[in-house]
Image (spheres, coloured by chain):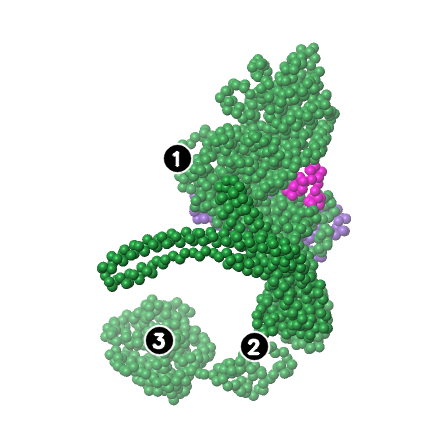
Chain colours: A purple, B green
Amino acid sequence: KRVPAAAPSVSMATAGARPLATGQAAPGAMAAAGSPSVFLLAVNGQIESGQFPGFDDLYCKFCFVYGQDWVPTAGLEEGISQITSKSDVAPTTLVWNFPIDITFKSTNPSGWPQIVVSVYGPDFFGNDVVRGYGAVHVPFTPGRHTRTIAMFVPESTSRLQKFTSWFTGRRPEFTDPKVVAQGEGREVTRVRSQGFVTISFNVVTKDMKKLGYDVSPSDMQNPSLVPVAEGIHRY
Amino acid sequence: MNRSEESQMIIMEEFLDEDPAQVERLRRTVTTRRHRRKKTLPEAVCPPEPRAEERSRTSMAAAPSGAAPAALRDLPPVPSTSRTGFAEFSVRERMREKLKAARSKAEITLLQEDPSPRPRRLKSIRERKTEVRLDKASDNDKFSQTQEDESHLPSKMKFCGSVKKVKQKSTFQNDFPSAEEAYNFFTFNFDPEPESIKAGARKRNELNEEEEAEEECVETHEDEQEEDETDEDVCLVKDDDLFIIGQTAEDFLVMKPADCESYSEQLKKEKEFLFTPSMLAVPTSEKMHGNMQPRYLEDEGLYTGERPFVSQSNQNILENRILRQEQGKEWFGDDGKILALPNPIKQSSTRPPIFSLEEGIAPELETVYRKAIKMTAANQYLVGPGDLQGPFQLDIDISGLIFTHHPCFSREHVLAAKLAQLYDQYLARKQKNLTRLLTDKLHALRNAVQCSIDGGSAGVPSPVAQQSIPEYKIEIRQTRRLRDAEQEKDRMLLKTIIKVWKQIKSLRDFQKFTNTPMKLYLRKEEIDQRLDEKAYEAEIQAEIKELLEECMEEYEKKMEEYKTELQEWKSWKKTQKSKKKKKKKEIHEEESVEDCDLGEERIKPIPPKMANSLDIEQQVREKADNCRRKPGEPALIPELVLSGSITPTELCPRAEVLRREDVKKRSAFIKVLFNSKEVSRTATRPISSDFRVHFGQIFNLQIFNWPESLKLQIYETMGMSSTTLLAEVFIPVPETTILTGSAPMEEIEFSSNQRVMLDHEGVGSGVSFSFEADGSNKMTLMTSGKVSNSVSWAVGEKGIPLIPPVSQQNSGIPSALKNIDAIASIGTSGLTDMKKLAKWAAEAKLDPNDPNNAALMQLIMVATSGEAHVPDFFRLEQLQQEFNFVSDEEFNRSKRFRLLQLRNGEVAEFRNYKQVPLHEREISEKIFQDYEKRLQERDVIDSKNYLDAHRAVVANYLQKVRESVINRFLIAKHHFLLSDLVNEEEIPSLGILGLSLFKLAEPKRPLKPRRKERKKVTAQNLSDGDIKLLVNIVRAYDIPVRKPVTSKLQQPSKSSRSFNEMFAASPSAQSPMDSPDWAFNQVLVRPFVEVSFQRTVCRTTTAEGPNPNWNEELELPFRAPNGDYSTHSLQSVKDEVFINIFDEVLHGAVEDDHERGSGIRTRVERHWLGCVKIPFTTIYFQARIDGTFKVDIPPVLLGYSKEKNLGIETGYDSVRNLSEGSYITLFITIEPQLIPGESVREKFDTQEDEKLLQAAEKYEADCTSKFPSRQCLTTVIDLNGKTVFITRYIKPLNPPQELLDAIPNSSQTAAELVARYVALIPFLPDSVSFAGICDLWSTSDQFLYLLAGDEEEHAVLLCNYFLGMGKKAWLIIGNGIPEGPTAYVLTLEQSQYVIWNPSTGYFYGQYDTFCPLQNVYCLITCDNIWFNMQEYDSPVRINFDVSKPKLWKSFFSRSLPYPGLCSVQPEELVYQHSDKAAAVELQGRIEKILKDKIMEWRPRHLTRWNRYCTSTLRNFLPLLEQNQGKDVEDDHQAELQKQLGDYRVSGFPIHMPYSEVGPLIEAVHSTGVHTIDVSNVEFALAVYIHAYPQNVLSVWIYVASLVRNR
């Protein structure tokens, strides 16, 4: 039977119908390294910067959303960064360089971890309001990756509410930032896009291949040599 | 494209300005050119749209050429950007100098010529605009020009550049450049320095000339062409044009008559311009290049696609047209036909063909019969009561068919049928025997009259008799008349029978054969002639006498009338006469007239005739002859038998033989139609010679819904072929009482209006025929007959009739499967045998290039190469196989996949399963065990836990309902609202805005504490330990106090008084005044509170006294089941918070006196006093519970008594004493506050009237807008998930008769007993059973069947009982503690309102402060709803008088009258009698279980049972039940005390309704009796179960611990 290359997005989509196949680990490999029952995914990197034109003094929070078969074994699942101000000169990006470092173990690629980033900052009146939510899957190929996430915020339901929320500084927020990592129920919301956040990941996996999940491209011998540019999402 | 025009204008202007001579010359050239062009233009032709492009192009070419011959040979080219800056500069400089010099001169000339040039210029523009070109000419022009353009592209470019330059300059001045610029431009003289420019210019000029020449040549060519056709008009134009240029403005105006062209001329002209392509075929030679011969590819064997069809004439026209074009031949192919793509229309349809079932179905498409399965209804999440779901059965027995007329009837048959009918009638009449009846009645009446007359003659005629005689007589007359009529009918019938029989006989004689076996016997009954005659005569005489009497009466009456009339007449006559006399004198003429009138007015009355007795006698005799048997004539009794022999067919004439054969050929069958759908049909049976068809078939129809219609269709078949529908018969749907076995056979008549004419003896149908020889007396008969059948409801295995519930009656048939699977109809092309196909393709030599064959060829290629095999089966999702990564078997076998699947399906056990292992081997089989067990047990009733089969069934059913509801909720959970996802502030109202603004100005008061709303947490990302239950125990009132146990220790003398005191539960037994010192010196009670929740126990410190004040906060952790903190899981938490009050008792451990001095060792014992139970769900939904609750204290607490009149705080006490019992003040909440789940957002279907629902919605909206906090309830959801109007639940119902019998007279006690009965039905909150779904209301019979329900079910039942007992009762919808929104019952007793708590059975006066009902929102009766419109809603402060519309807003009012909604409740409740034997058995089992449990809870101690005490207690319990736990009599306690005097007893009875064993065990455990660890302790446990009707059980458990006193 053919095992499709385990793309997390695919697995998310098909998880409802059929869980992904588990290819049997080769018996030879099993003898050599014992037989792993979980695979590990170590992610480190940083939330590098954000571009939020017109906003300043922002900080960001991050957390991971993952499926039921995933367990974080080390590192921090959530974090909150410092407040960053824009520089006065040309590249007016907000630089956080906030490190992330987490290791997961899992038995199933379904529910591959996603990082959820939410950015907050003061508004005109100094109230702390949300400036953007965004989420992206942790890259599943080992190596260094950079991801740029487009951020968005929920919209007010009416003009009057928009005004009052602006006035009172209580803008609509997601009840749980993790909402942005799931598709369910999103149809009832309206959002406005607002800025970008760039995250870099360094991904290391262990035992994936042994358990039958071959994530490296077939024409590539050394996955660590993936050029960085390839991983950047272009928006 | 005005650019060139402008440039030309500029040129012209300049010329005009500068040099008249030059201008003249230029003008001439321009005009000639224009004339030449003009010639081609017809002025009269209405101008088509000017083609600016072409015009510009030609003028572009023309403009410089016009300029070139004029003096400006060295016209300066416009300086282009490529020129060097310096050159440009110098040129400009020089131009400027020139300009200065020339300006003055130019200005002068401008001034001189000012008036003329402008119009001229305008004119020229106008003319240009009207310039029109013929298509053809322009085409030619264009063609030649484009060719030119191509060849001289660079020069053209340059020229464009110059033009552009000019344009750039000129744009500023709209259409023409300023004078100086123009001057500047054209008058410029080149200096020798810019050589290159000059050369360029010259070169360009040359090129332009070339262009000009080219064009000229084309134009002249055109001229030549058209020279022949030019007419005078053209010449005129020429002249005009000359004029225009030459003359001044005045000369332009020429008066001319309007032109009118003749039609022929017009045609002629049109002929010039219009081209009508010929429809004749073009010879092939014209279409081919050179001398090529047409080549036919198809003939050469190459594939040429099929050309789309174009009619030959159209094709010819097109060809002709194309040929006129240049290179038109390119359009033709090798075969001399126009090139064409192959026909795009596909030969095969892209949609799959629809196969007819009959012929040649591909095996893959063959349909397979599957038995019909019941579709689960759309509302599948609510199941109806279990046993009503099954298929119901209707048995239709069709026994046979009898034709009363049939086309094949012979005449004899017709008569026989008639005879049979008459005979039937006769039999029926005979059975009724009306004549006899009436005759008897007549005799009786006569006797009565005789008697009364005789009696009257004997003595004084009583006035009663006098009065009754005429009545009798009237009666006699009527009866006689009736009898006569009946007798006549009888006789007529008999006569007709005989007549018909005679007819038959004569017919048989006539036709010489017999068709029917009918024979009529007339049995003569001999009668004694003499007697008969006598009776006859007597009868006649009596009648005559009566008639005479009657006549006399009548005569007298008439005589009377006559006399009065005569009198009147006479008086009138007299007056007339007198009048006449007067008038005679006056006018003679008038006399006669008047006389006449008067004479006419009154006729002298005629005296009535006396009836003649002879006449009467004759009448009577005549009548008797007619309608009565003659005396002595034997009575005839007809008898119809079927014993006659039918003439065999051989002996019959031919026509008859034919008829018989025809009958033999015919057969009939009946179709059974259910809801107009054929469900079955009988076998086809031949029609017998006597036109009877016997079927004798029974059809069992399994149905789900109440039938809408039942119909039989009777069909007749003739021979092999034709089948005709004779008639349709509707059968009534049987009553629910008609069951199979008891159903009578019924005959249903049918008839058909079919017209049949036959060519044999048969009389036909709808055809008139006659029995007479002369054809008179015709009759027409229609085919008719009777079907004998019976329809009944089948009886199930257990004797349960399989009848659909009547409530389904109006629900109609579920709409047929509307969504027919679309995929099913999509099939692949029927490829069956590949090899055959390939072979055929090879043989047929298919053109492989033909795209039509492409699919086939590819298929054949694939097939023959053997790479892919064509499956020999049909599959819906063909590509699914490709995506399957494991085979289905493997998939099903794998435990891992199964686990993943179950988890994905949100099956309860696996919903939160984390980390599904990667390898099969790591998944233990145990994981599935529980799940599989549950699946198996779903239908298996486990009687172990329930001890009672019925309850097991019910529990099972409830479990199913619960599951389905939870599933429903799970689905609803995936529907999100915006508020679920986004937190958004609500729009503040103006008031709030104002307030907040006001607050800004408020001074800050940092020390003033403010209440902050707690933040609510959605239960999503919570885990164990996050949620805590906070219980704040404030204080308690009236805790029972110890009886002086200690005093007993002090006084070891065992007096009877002390025993008495020891068990004194009755407060009267003890008066505090007895020992005032004791009351103050001793500790009455040392209570503490222990809260246990989910087996976690917390306790307060010990307080002292009966009114302790703790004010302590206890914190208990909360664990959700399975670690699932989602809303629906929290809603279904069944745990309860137990708040137990204990008394801490210190005992001296060492009781030896000599050790007392050295030290005190005490042992702490605790004694349970009472408890309060609050379900977790209540706390969850209420968010917080705050209030004073009644403590559930057992009726007997050994060793304790209620302190009643301890009167320290007198005022408050007096109020409290009204309601007995102890109270505890509590505050309970959850930290953090959880948001309770919302009810499922789903619209339920309903059977209510739409108008009513709308009214209900409006009413609710009205009410809630005024009082948003008050709940307004109009519709509820029943167990089937349908919306039902609430008043339908209220209906007077009968309480069990046993209860009413128990207390025959006292209505008060009976009411209490009924309330207690209702309260004994176990309480099961909906939120537990039906998590997340709003309340489901079951009807009272469902409630009694399920024996579980929550407040509203209890309240509805109690309310219905009260109504049934004749009380005035309402259902209260309100808010109570601790249950929250709830339902109570209100009754009006002796002008006082009483509020009943249906779940406890307690009742409260309206002004009772401790009434748990806090708010009243609505009152509901069976015909109305009242909403509380009063300012307050506390029952103490409101008026319950619903007749006041200001206080209570009623739903049904004058504007919306009550439509008379029928109730959903049953007519009457049927109760099972209480089963005493089962109760006793259950009692024993429970006792055993509890004893085992107590021993289990004391694993380290020996548990001894005091049998003696147990039996005493057991005797005591029925008494408690009898007295409903009140006023336990003292002597029984005394008795107990006497027997157990040596023991220190602590214990109490627990009373509970019985649902399961679990709660009983829990209750016993929570009392903590087993915790005593004194070594010599003994236990006593007694259980008593009292059975009430309908299996409602009241359980008493008496548990006590005994410690022997030394």
Q: Which residues are magenta?
A: B932-959
Question: Which residue lies at the image location 63% right of the left edge and 15% below the top edge?
Answer: B1057
Q: SS at mark 3?
A: helix
Residue B156 spot, x, y in % from top left: 43, 75
Dot 1 alpha-carbon crowd within 10 angstroms: few under 14, some 14 to 19, many 20 or more: few
Dot 3 alpha-carbon crowd within 10 angstroms: few under 14, some 14 to 19, many 20 or more: some
Residue B1335 in sight here: yes
Q: SS at mark 2?
A: loop
Label 2: chain letter = B
Label 3: chain letter = B
Mark 2 and mark 3 on one chain: yes
Q: Report the amino acid beneath label 2.
A: Pro
Q: Of circles 1 and 3, which is in front?
A: 1
Front-most of residues B537 and B1365: B537
Question: Which residue lies at the image location 53% right of the left edge and 41% below the top edge?
Answer: B458
User: Image check: B837 left or right of B24?
Assistant: right
Q: Which residue is mark 2?
A: B308
Q: Which residue is mark 3?
A: B129
Magenta stretch prevailing secondary structure? helix
Question: Which residue lies at the image location 69% right of the left edge and 59% below the top edge?
Answer: B696
Q: Report the amino acid beneath label 1.
A: Ala
Label 1: chain letter = B
Question: What's the mark number on residue B1001?
Answer: 1
Separation of residues labelled 2 and 3 (CA atoms): 45 Å
Dot 2 alpha-carbon crowd within 10 angstroms: few under 14, some 14 to 19, many 20 or more: few
